[in-house]
Image (cartoon, rainbow, N blue to C red):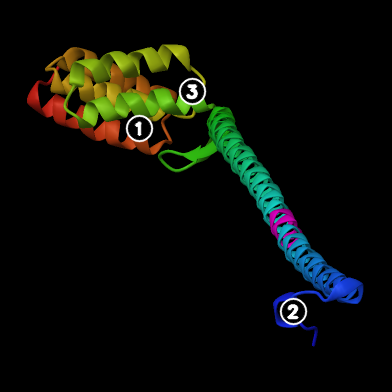
Amino acid sequence: METSAAALGPPNGVAGWAELSRVVCAALIGAGAACTMGCTVGQGLFAVSSASAIELRQRVETSRQRSTEELARTNEDNAQLRRSVLDLSNEIEQLHDELATLRGQNETLTHDIETMRMSEPAKVAVDGPEFVAEAAETQAFDAALAAFHKGNFAKAQVAFASFVRRYPQSGYKASALLWLGNCQLELMDVKSARRTFEDLVKAYPQSEAAGVAKERLARLRQRSPL
């Protein structure tokens, strides 16, 4: 341990002053060393603190950049998902339109097939024997008969008379003449009914309609003999 200058007392001659100088120099050197050490430690602590702050900022920046990138990817994924949903919705709408078109085509095809089937000649049987009749022919006869059954005898008379003129060779003709005579009877046109029944018996004597017409004629003769 160095002795302080105060403890040495007043210098005694040249040797005393030399010793005092040595002690002072030693004290100054020690103080300088201590100061240097303190500065070095302070600088070291500052350097450590600065390095930690830089590292922390780098970590924060890295984390922020990573978050930004993840957010961008999430936004892109969401946008892609929205586009996919929109595309799917458009495809569904297109399928609905195509289905509606196909349904319409199917209905049209079904109608065309039914029309073709109804327009084709078909075998029918009226009053016994079978014969081939056109679709329009059958429809005309059925319409006239329906009018009679509804009690619209005037309309039925016109329809049956028109049928006989339009289809003179029809297999329905014998039956049409019978129903025409029935219409005339319902309308109290006995003279026309008698003539119609007579034409039927003459043209189709072996038909079932002719047998019924003969019965009608017999009753008419009983009511008003010629």
Q: Is residue 162 left or right of residue 150?
A: right
Indicate which disc residue 4 carries.
Answer: 2
Amino acid type at circle 2 is Ser
- Marks 3 and 1, how far apart in space? 25 Å
What segment carries the magenta color? 51-58
Q: Which residue is mark 1?
A: 210
Rendered residue at 58%/29% (across/down)? 112
For the residue carrying disc 1, how many other residues have a C-alpha within 10 Å: few (<14), some (14-19), or many (20+)? many
Single out the mark in the foreground, 2 or 1: 2
Q: Earlier in the sequence, mark 2 or mark 1?
A: 2
Amino acid type at circle 3 is Ala
Q: Nearer the viewer, residue 172 or 76?
A: 76
Q: Quadrant of residue 15?
A: bottom right
Q: Is residue 10 above or below residue 149?
A: below
Q: Earlier in the sequence, mark 3 or mark 2?
A: 2
Q: Which residue is mark 3?
A: 136
- Marks 2 and 1, how far apart in space? 168 Å
Q: Earlier in the sequence, mark 3 or mark 1?
A: 3
Q: Is residue 143 left or right of residue 65?
A: left
Q: Is residue 174 left or right of residue 196?
A: right
Q: Quadrant of residue 217?
A: top left
In magenta segment, residue 52 = yes
Amino acid type at circle 1 is Ala
* Residue 52 position in % (x across, y down): 72, 62
Quadrant of the image for the C terminus?
Answer: top left
- In the rendered structure, are the residues bearing label 3 and label 2 in contact, judged by CB atoms less than 8 Å apart? no
Single out the mark in the foreground, 3 or 1: 3
Helix, strand or loop under label 2 = loop
